[in-house]
Image (cartoon, helix red, strand yellow):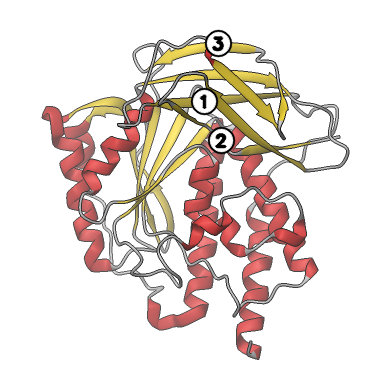
Amino acid sequence: MNIRMRICLITVILLHAGVAAFPQENSAATSRTVRLNVIVSAKSGTPVSGLGEQDFSLLDNKAPRSIQSFKVVSSSQEPVKVILLIDAVNTNFDRVAYVRNEVQKFLKANDGKLANPTTIAVLTDDGTQMQKGFTQDGNALNASLEHYTIGLRQLTRSTGIWGANDRVQISLTAVQQLAAYALTIPGRKIVLWVSPGWPLLSGNRFDLDSKQQRQIFANVVAFSKELQQANLTLYNINPLGPEESLFREDYYQDFLKGVSKAGQTDLADLSLQVLAVQSGGLSLNGQSDVAGNLEKCLSDTESWYEVTFATSVAEQRDEYHHIQITVDKPGLTARTRDGYYAQP
C-alpha cells in the first residue's frame, strides 16, 4: 500500500468513529428484550400469513430460546411507514434521471394510491433532504419530487479515493440521521434506499491496524443497536449493478456474517448492502426494473410476525449473538435481523 492510500484510509476510519455517536447504554438501562419482525415466504417469494407461535423455533447463538410474545401483524392493522430515498451521491448523474423516472412510475401506479404511508428523501452532496410527513397519495409525492433539484454531484469518480472517502462519510451520516428520525416515530419503519451503495474501501489494498479495527467495530455495534431500537429495516435497490463497485457485484456477501470481535472487522462491514441484509431487509439488483423491485421490497410489509425473546446476560460488553429463526413447515423460509449485541 502506498503512503497516500494509508493516510486516506486513516481519515475514513476517524470519520466513521464520529458518525455513530449513539447514546451508550449502561447495564441498568440495557434492554433484555429483543423484538424481531419476521417475514415468512414460500418458494415463490409470496408472504405467508396464518402461522402460529408453535410453528416457530428460535435459536440465540445456537441455544434454544423461548418466545416471550408472538403477534401476527398485517399492514391493515399496523401500516408500515416507508422512506423512499434517491441516492444522488453514489449514483451517476445520468443514471439518477432513470432512477427518478422509475420512482415516479412507482408513485403513480394504481392511480397514485400507495399501500403504505410514504415520504421521499434525496441524498445529495449537501446531505439528506426529506419531505415532511407521510402520505399514501403517490401523486402528491410525485408532484413534490418534481420540485427537488438533483444536480450534478461534486464527488465524482475523478476525485479518486479521496472522493470515495467523502461519499462514505456522507452516506453513513445519512444512515445515522434516518435511524435517529425513525426513533421518533412509533411502529415499524423501512427505508427503500435506491443506490449502488457507497465504496466498500476494502481488500488487499487497505491495511487496518488494531486501533482502526476497534473503531470500525464500535460503529458496527452502534448501527446495529440504533436500527434495532428504531425498529427500522433497510432495503437496498441497486440501479447500476457492479458499475461503481471496487469489486465484483456480490463482494459484500463475504461480510454478511455478523462481526463478533474487533479483529474481524473490515470497512465493508458498514456497506449499505451488509447493513440492509443484517437488519432483516434485502439487497436487490434493480437496474432493469427499479419500480418492480420497490414493489417486491414492499411485499414484506403486507404481513409479518412480531416475536420477542429475552436475552441472556453477556460475559463481556458488545457480545455478538447470532439469531436463527425457522418455521416448522415444508417449503417456507423465515427472514429477520441477523443478530444483536448483548451487554453484561
Q: Which residue is mark 2?
A: 337
- The residue positioned farthest toward the front in the image shown: 330
Residue at screen point 49% across, 72% down: 164
Relative vertical location of residue 212 with respect to residue 207 in this rendering, above or below: above
**Mark 3 secondary-structure assignment:** helix
Q: Position of residue 134 (x, y in %)?
A: 34, 29
Q: Which residue is mark 3?
A: 53
| Between discs 2 and 3, the one toward the N terminus | 3
Q: Is residue 134 at least partly visible in the picture?
A: no
Q: Position of residue 126 (x, y in %)?
A: 43, 61
Circle number at residue 297: none
Instruction: Name which residue type carries label 3.
Output: Glu
Instruction: Name which residue type carries label 1.
Output: Asn
* Label 3, residues with CA under 10 Å away: few <14, some 14-19, many ≥20: some
Q: Which residue is mark 1?
A: 37
Q: Position of residue 200 (x, y in %)?
A: 52, 66
Residue at screen point 71% across, 59% down: 264
